Amino acid sequence: MTFSKGARLAIPVLAVLVLLAAVPQATQARGPLYRTTYPSKVTHKLWSGVSNILFCWVEIPIEINREIQNTDPFSGSLVGLGRGIWFTGRRLGVGVVDAVTCPFDVWSNNYGTVQRTDFPFIDEVE
């Protein structure tokens, strides 16, 4: 049995689409024990710390963008740069604490007064 050129291309594309549809979405994949068991808390804290260390610098363009949208470009850039450097230092500090203390559930990852989110850019997506 021979297939035309279009059918030979459509079969793998259709197979990939079926597999992608079968993968559960992130909101559906969360079960009743999501971030309640000790191993899930530890891995979440480790990944949060590592991502905060690696991506703490993104606070600078985020804050510059926010300030430029709220004010004029010149003062927004200056104020945003200052706020971005401040939030970068805070995110880096929290990331180091999370990465070092990941085996211990010291504060239950409750840094609401120190930083806005566990991961950078998460509030930009939601």
Image (tube, rainbow, N blue to C red):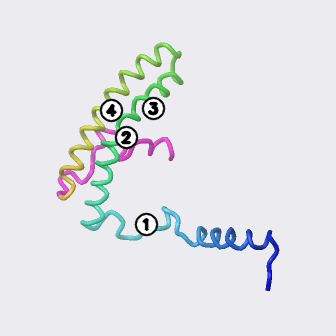
Camera-nearest label, 1 or 2: 2
Expressed as whole percent of the image width and height from the top left, the position of residue 25 reads 52, 64
Q: Which mark is residue 59?
A: none
- Residue type at mark 1: give it: Arg
Q: Is residue 60 magenta?
A: no
Looking at the image, tell me whether mark 3 or mark 1 is earlier in sequence order: 1
Instruction: Name the residue beneath numbered marker 1.
Output: 30
Do residues under tags 3 and 2 come within 8 Å of each other at their CB atoms? Answer: no
- Residue type at mark 4: give it: Thr
Expressed as whole percent of the image width and height from the top left, the position of residue 114 reads 28, 38
- Residue type at mark 3: give it: Ile
Q: Residues within 10 Å of mark 1 (few under 14, many from 20)?
A: few
What distance separates the C-alpha of mark 1 from that of mark 2?
Answer: 25 Å
Expressed as whole percent of the image width and height from the top left, the position of residue 90 reads 28, 34
- Residue type at mark 2: give it: Phe
Do residues under tags 3 and 1 come within 8 Å of each other at their CB atoms? Answer: no
Instruction: Name the residue beneath numbered marker 3.
Output: 62
Q: Which residues are magenta?
A: 104-125
Do residues under tags 2 and 4 come within 8 Å of each other at their CB atoms? Answer: no
Instruction: Name the residue beneath numbered marker 4.
Output: 88
What distance separates the C-alpha of mark 3 from that of mark 2?
Answer: 12 Å
Looking at the image, tell me whether mark 3 or mark 2 is earlier in sequence order: 2
Looking at the image, tell me whether mark 4 or mark 3 is earlier in sequence order: 3
Instruction: Name the residue beneath numbered marker 2.
Output: 55
Looking at the image, tell me whether mark 2 or mark 4 is earlier in sequence order: 2
